[in-house]
Image (spheres, grey):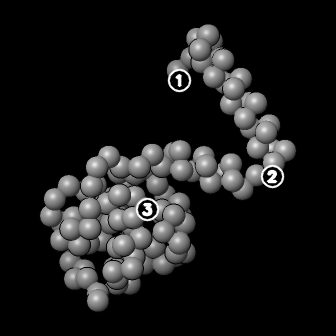
């Protein structure tokens, strides 16, 4: 079943913007190519139920909002996309580099705790 396209593209783009994700990162998280996602946002492809389900599941998006513009954008708080991105990066590293990253993260926490790091 295809969804009527009138403003679904705008809502799709709004969800992505609210999550502060690039088209590439958003597409990767819902298991489609960046080019396919771009075509969805531009209305060159129809957004089907499978895509809506993936977006709703992955990002906790309210399906009724996405389909019809009714209700809140998210079912509750949006997911922490920075954490998900960090986990994706971490998972792609080999074990030695994962261990190195953990050591570096602990050192960064020490710097933050001592107040040495200054906000830009």
Above or below, comparing residue 100 to residue 53 in the picture: above
**Which residue bears the numbered disc 2?**
94
Based on the displayed image, in which of its 4 quarters is residue 73 positioned?
Answer: bottom left
Label 3–label 2 contact, CB within 8 A: no
Q: Is mark 1 on a helix, strand or loop?
A: loop
Q: Which residue is drawn at 27% across and 55% down?
A: 75
Horizontal placement of 32 versus 77: left or right? right
**Which residue bears the numbered disc 3?**
58
Based on the displayed image, in which of its 4 quarters is residue 88 positioned?
Answer: bottom right
**Which residue bears the numbered disc 1?**
120
Above or below, comparing residue 108 to residue 82 in the picture: above
Horizontal placement of 98 versus 84: left or right? right
Q: Nearer the viewer, residue 70 or 13?
A: 70
- Gap in angstroms between the C-alphas marked 1 and 2: 32 Å
Disc nearer the start of the sequence (1/3): 3
**Rendered location of residue 50, percent (x, y):** 39, 79
- Gap in angstroms between the C-alphas marked 1 and 3: 32 Å
Residue 45 marker: none
Q: What element carries label 3?
A: helix
- As drawn, which residue projects farthest toward the left? 70
Above or below, comparing residue 15 to residue 120 in the picture: below
């Amino acid at each position: 079943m295809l969804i009527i396209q009138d403003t679904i593209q705008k809502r799709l783009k709004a969800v992505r913007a609210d999550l502060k994700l690039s088209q590439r990162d958003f597409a990767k998280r819902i298991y489609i190519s960046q080019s396919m996602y771009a075509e969805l946002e531009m209305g060159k492809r129809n957004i089907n139920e499978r895509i809506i389900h993936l977006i709703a599941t992955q990002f906790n998006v309210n399906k009724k909002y996405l389909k019809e513009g009714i209700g809140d954008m998210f079912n509750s708080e949006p997911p922490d996309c920075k954490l998900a991105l960090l986990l994706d990066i971490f998972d792609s590293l080999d074990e030695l580099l994962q261990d190195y990253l953990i050591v570096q993260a602990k050192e960064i926490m020490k710097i933050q705790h001592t107040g040495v790091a200054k906000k830009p």
